[in-house]
Amino acid sequence: MDPAEAQRHDHFLRSFTANEAAIRAYVRRLVPTRADADDVMQDVSVVLWKKFAEFRPGGNFRAWAFGVARFEALAWRRDKARDRLVLDDEVVARLAEETVEMEPFLSRQREALEICIKKVQPGQRDLLMRAYQSDTRIHDLAKSSGRSVPGFYQWLHRVRRMLLDCIRRHLSQRIESQ
């Protein structure tokens, strides 16, 4: 690989990695399930790489990637058009527009969540993260944690509430400091 190609590759990877969570969240709002979002994200990643030469240096990578993601979500929708769970093109377009408008706030929320999750004790944090894995059965997780299923749900509710309060405090402190 020549130095210019290596630099281009490095720039793409840095830009994509820095924005992947936001792009994935954007896609997730446009398709019905996480599995669908994973499929669309694969296509988005490939298209972004193939079209990266068209990206203007110094441009807004996230906005450009959102545009690609929107078209890939629409393409996915056309492929799944006979499925009753697919949203109308107009609804997808509106969701895409609203998501772009909300992205700065959603990004701040994600950052606050990362900070707040780090405040949860490691063992509790591991249990919390396992509760949100797609292959997790809450019954098994409750049993391994020494709780009943209702007790586990109560614990999970308390942790979520604590995280929500922490996020709200973090966001309000950020607003006050600006």
Image: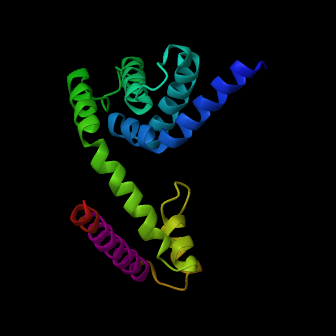
Left or right: 31 with respect to 141? Answer: left
34 is higher (above) or lower (below) than 96: below
Between 121 and 19, the one nearer to me in the picture: 19
Q: Tell me where residue 163 sits by quadrant.
A: bottom left
Does the magenta-highlighted stretch encompass residue 163? yes
171 is higher (above) or lower (below) than 125: above
Please name the residue shown 25% across and 43% down the image: 102
Does the magenta-highlighted stretch encompass residue 27? no
The percent position of residue 152, horizontal first and vertical second, equals: 43, 79
27 is higher (above) or lower (below) than 127: above
Q: Quadrant of the N terminus?
A: top right
Q: Tell me where residue 32 sits by quadrant.
A: top left
Q: Residue furthest bottom?
A: 146
Between 43 and 16, the one nearer to me in the picture: 16
Q: Quadrant of the C terminus?
A: bottom left
The percent position of residue 65, horizontal first and vertical second, equals: 43, 28
Please name the residue shown 20% across and 23% down the image: 90
Please name the residue shown 32% across and 67% down the image: 167
Q: Main SS of the magenta segment?
A: helix
Left or right: 178 with respect to 53? Answer: left
Between 94 and 50, the one nearer to me in the picture: 50
Please name the residue shown 55% across and 86% down the image: 146
Q: Tell me where residue 149 sits by quadrant.
A: bottom left
Q: Residue furthest top?
A: 54
Q: What stretch of residues is rendered in magenta?
A: 150-171
